[in-house]
Image: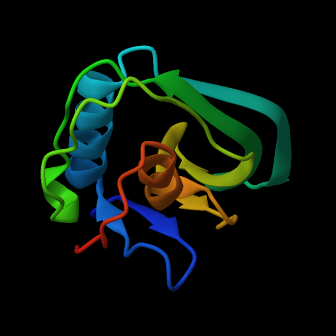
Amino acid sequence: MEKTVRNQPNSMPPASAVGCLTIFSGLAAGIPNLMFNFHTVHDLHERQADSKVQATTRIAGSQTESFILPPLGLPPIPQTAQSISLPEEHWNYTVVNNKIARIFVEHVSGGGIAGLLHQLGVNVPIIQ
């Protein structure tokens, strides 16, 4: 079973686990102090086989280096020395056998990769 990270329709298509890790690695290369602040964690339901958990998440950091995000089909992102602080998002996790099997991120205006790039002054379409 391939694990995916899903966003709302009309934002970004699902990313495979490898694609997601590649994106986060690229972001960490350019924004080494990238922070994911998780708070207000709720169990939405719990069953024997799986459970659903929701966490409110805020992402912030300062870009110090250029970086690339190959899975998104973007050109290299130049170093801008800008700080980013994305709006809070709800991340919904499906946990199966004590492992995250799926992450669904509820779309918010100004959030996600598009919001991060916009705060860096990079306005290019995401091709995936």
Q: Residue at x 52, y 23 (%)?
A: 61
Q: Residue at x 48, y 47 (%)?
A: 116
8 lies above or below 81: below
> Going by the image, does 61 lie left or right of 46?
left
Q: Quadrant of residue 27?
A: top left
Q: Residue at x 37, y 62 (%)?
A: 123
The structure's colour scheme is: rainbow
116 lies above or below 14: above
Give the image location of residue 81, x and y in percent. 38, 23
> Going by the image, does 31 lie left or right of 68?
right
> Going by the image, does 6 lie left or right of 30?
right
Q: Quadrant of residue 39?
A: top right
Q: In this orientation, does residue 48 appear?
A: no
The residue positioned farthest toward the bottom in the image shown: 10
Pick the quarter of the image with the N terminus: bottom left
Pick the quarter of the image with the C terminus: bottom left
118 lies above or below 63: below
* In-front residue for pair 46/102: 102
* In-front residue for pair 90/114: 114
Q: In this orientation, does residue 124 appear?
A: yes
Give the image location of residue 46, x and y in percent. 78, 52
Q: Residue at x 22, y 53 (%)?
A: 19
> Going by the image, does 115 lie left or right of 87?
left
Disc tally is: 0
